[in-house]
Amino acid sequence: MNGIQHIVKLLRPKQWVKNLFVFLPLFFDKRLFEMDGLLPCVLMFFAFSFASSGIYCFNDINDVEADRKHHEKRNRPIASGAVSIRAGYVLMIICLLVAAMFLWAITWFNAGAASAVFLIVGLYVVMNIAYSLKLKQLAIIDVFIIAIGFVLRVFAGGMAAGAGLSHWIVLMTFLLTLFLAFAKRRDDVVVYENSGVEVRKSVSNYNISFLNTAISVVASITMVCYIMYTVSPNVVSRFNSSYVYLTSVFVLAGIIRYLQITIVETRSGSPTKVLLHDHFIHGCILCWLIAFTLILYL
């Protein structure tokens, strides 16, 4: 693997799929195909992507010793020595500067959002640096920080595009990503119990029984919240359709499949990898998108 490939691996572009959450406000505002909203969201997507890549650089530098003890993470560019710590800091600074350039470009389309988008992304960066340094060592707080990061993406997308944000979008984003974060922690505990390797310090304050309960509770609340959203009079009136509730089938199927992956197959360590490679979940997401697109735009 040459130097460029190591750098790309360090920046983790596959993780950029998480930043698609910035498009949610525009999608639910029925403006996904309007350029005055879509272009700022595209810029916000890249701003968040480069900001998150900068954070990955910082995280890998900070965790270099722990990563070298992990059966998979020891192959990361900095942990393996393929990229030096100094180069990691340089890449981090470059990524954050590129993110700032994309944020500045958003002001061409929506000058009024300038302070808001810089504030939100800045808060995301500061919060995740604190997460890398200390907060990820604190059980429960660590997963809540992850979920809040996704809520910030949604707020940033809404601000950039000038799209309205409902409390339902915020709640669903928080609950769904909290569910995924708890599932990821369960995988960390499985690794710890099988190999004795403590992936992160918060692992010792979790166990399988607690995480199974937490995952089940959050999954149940997420599903109930989504059903309440689909039958809400405001939603039915806004979308001019009483059939939104039908999309619940695909959400329920996707959540149950992810529970199966987590508890039965024990491979929820990387939610991004699961979402990119599991065909059943692909089908659920695709069917949900098609159904909702037909309801919103036709």
Image (spheres, grey):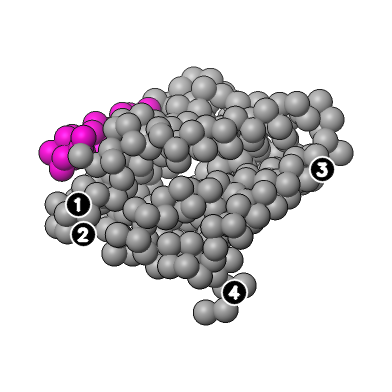
Identify which amino acid the numbered label 2 is placed on.
Answer: Glu
Q: Which residue is mark 2?
A: 265
The residue depicted at 46 percent of the width and 48 percent of the height is 62
Which of the labelled discs sits on residue 192, or is there none?
A: 1
Disc 4 or 1, which lies upstream in sequence?
Answer: 4
Write down the region rendered in magenta: 205-225
Residue 103 x, y percent position in the rendering = 75, 40
Chief secondary structure of the magenta portion: helix
Q: Which residue is mark 3?
A: 105
Q: Which residue is mark 4?
A: 3
Which of the two marks, 4 or 3, is nearer to us in this view? 4
Identify which amino acid the numbered label 3 is placed on.
Answer: Ala
Q: Are marks 4 and 3 in contact (CB under 8 Å)?
A: no
Question: Is residue 179 among the parts visible in the rendering?
Answer: no
3D distance between C-alphas at marks 3 and 1:
45 Å
Which of the labelled discs sits on residue 239, or is there none?
A: none
